Amino acid sequence: MHRGVGPVFLWARKMAASGAEPQILVQYLVLRKDLSQAPFSWPAGAMVAQACHAATAALHIHRDHPYTAAYLRDLGRMRKVVLEAADESTLKELAETLQQSNIDHMLWLEQPENIATCIALRPYPKEEVNQYLKKYRLFK
């Protein structure tokens, strides 16, 4: 059970009292849309699992980053945005761009097939990563 009164809660209340807005952190995921369509036709549960694997891995790998720690301390304010990439090449191109720009992320490879399925960024303020993700639509 989540306890509502902790250091982050008290910090947020102090920020609200001072008129300052706490920084909103978002974890972005980019999931391959083509896997849900023919010829792959993965079921919705399998697609959700890929996003969960990628998100969990990114949070674990970057657990010591201050933004990740803050994101995990405030469970009631977690925000995730799931976007769609058309296919594997589009997903891999994004992974390369993120790598070159030093944006922390995890490219999830489904095993044993070694299929790239999803990218999850560690939590970021949206302003820091918007430029890399603005061409992707919400996953439908």
Image: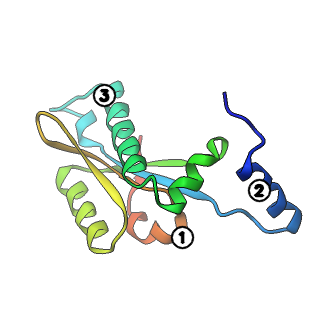
N-terminal label among 2 and 1: 2
Q: Position of residue 77 (x, y in %)?
A: 65, 46
Disc 2 is placed on an element classified as: helix
Residue position for label 2: 12
Disc 3 is placed on an element classified as: helix
Q: Of 123 and 30, which appears nearest the observer?
A: 123
Q: Of 38 and 79, which appears nearest the observer?
A: 79
Neighbour class for label 2 at 10 Å: few (<14), some, many (≥20)?
some
* Image quadrant where one finds the C terminus: top left
In the picture provided, is 17 more to the left or to the right than 104? Answer: right
Give the Cα distance between marks 3 and 2.
Answer: 37 Å
Residue position for label 3: 46
In the picture provided, is 25 more to the left or to the right than 33? Answer: right
**Which quadrant holds residue 48?**
top left
Q: Position of residue 137 (x, y in %)?
A: 42, 53
Residue position for label 1: 127
Q: Position of residue 3 (x, y in %)?
A: 72, 35
Is 127 situated above or below 114?
below
Q: Position of residue 6 (x, y in %)?
A: 74, 45
The residue shown at (79%, 68%) is 20
* Image quadrant where one finds the N terminus: top right
The type of residue carrying mark 3 is Ala
Q: Residue furthest right?
A: 17
Is 129 situated above or below 88?
below
Q: Are marks 3 and 2 in contact (CB under 8 Å)?
A: no
Q: How is the image coloured?
A: rainbow
The type of residue carrying mark 1 is Glu
The residue shown at (34%, 44%) is 54
Give the Cα distance between marks 1 and 3.
Answer: 31 Å
